[in-house]
Image: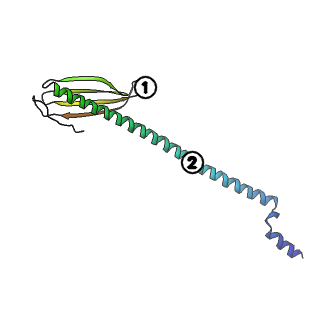
Amino acid sequence: MKKYLELKDRGNKSNLTMKQFNNVKGQALFFVLFLLAIFGALSGTLAVMWETQNRVRALDRDGSFALYLAQAGIEQAKIWARNNPGSSTTNTGIPLGGGNYDFSVNGPTRNLSSVGRALDGSGNTIAERQLSAQANAGYTALAAWSWREQ
């Protein structure tokens, strides 16, 4: 009968001794802490990646806006060159939207250049793009033409 009770008690997990029970609790605590460390590291990595992605998007948006301003400057230079054949000019700080642009027309070969700047709320430059073009129209009336980014 005694052997039967010993065998029966071995199969019953609820009869753990206090030392065995503390050992199981320690393993569970270690496992939970390990999982928390893994999830913490993954969460931190995700947060850093998210912040970096937001910065990249903001820089791309500001750079595109500055490019559009520079294109507006080239278009303004084209209009000026068409209406003033043979002369040169430089116009700076023309406001448009949340930024400004400069344009210049130089020489009889009609070298056009433009700088577009995206500005923050304080008026500081946060992005800048430059474009240039050349019109080979001489002193005659300019025909329809376009520019190419360099």
From the viewer's perspective, tell me whether residue 138 is left or right of residue 115: left
From the viewer's perspective, tell me whether residue 147 is left or right of residue 100: left
Asked if residue 16 is positioned above or below residue 98 in the image, the reply reads below
- Dot 2 corresponds to which residue? 41
Q: Position of residue 15 (x, y in %)?
A: 82, 64
Residue drawn 81% across and 58% down?
18
Q: Secondary structure at mark 2?
A: helix
Q: Position of residue 20 (x, y in %)?
A: 78, 60
- Dot 1 corresponds to which residue? 121
From the viewer's perspective, tell me whether residue 17 is left or right of residue 141: right
Q: Position of residue 81 (x, y in %)?
A: 17, 27
Kind of residue at disc 1: Gly
Kind of residue at disc 2: Ala
Give the CA distance from mark 2 to mark 1: 36 Å
Residue drawn 74% across and 58% down?
24
The quadrant where residue 65 appears:
top left
Q: Position of residue 64 (x, y in %)?
A: 35, 37
Residue 77's tag is none
From the viewer's perspective, tell me whether residue 86 is left or right of residue 114: left
Residue drawn 53% across and 43% down?
47
- Looking at the image, is mark 2 or mark 1 earlier in the sequence? 2
Q: Secondary structure at mark 1?
A: loop
Looking at the picture, tell me which residue is in the foreground, 43 or 141: 141
Looking at the image, do the residues carrying marks 2 and 1 touch, with CB atoms under 8 Å apart? no
Q: Quadrant of the C terminus?
A: top left
Residue drawn 22% across and 26% down?
104
Classed neighbour count for the residue bearing mark 2: other residues with Cα under 10 Å, few (<14), some (14–19), many (≥20)? few
Classed neighbour count for the residue bearing mark 1: other residues with Cα under 10 Å, few (<14), some (14–19), many (≥20)? few
The quadrant where residue 5 appears:
bottom right
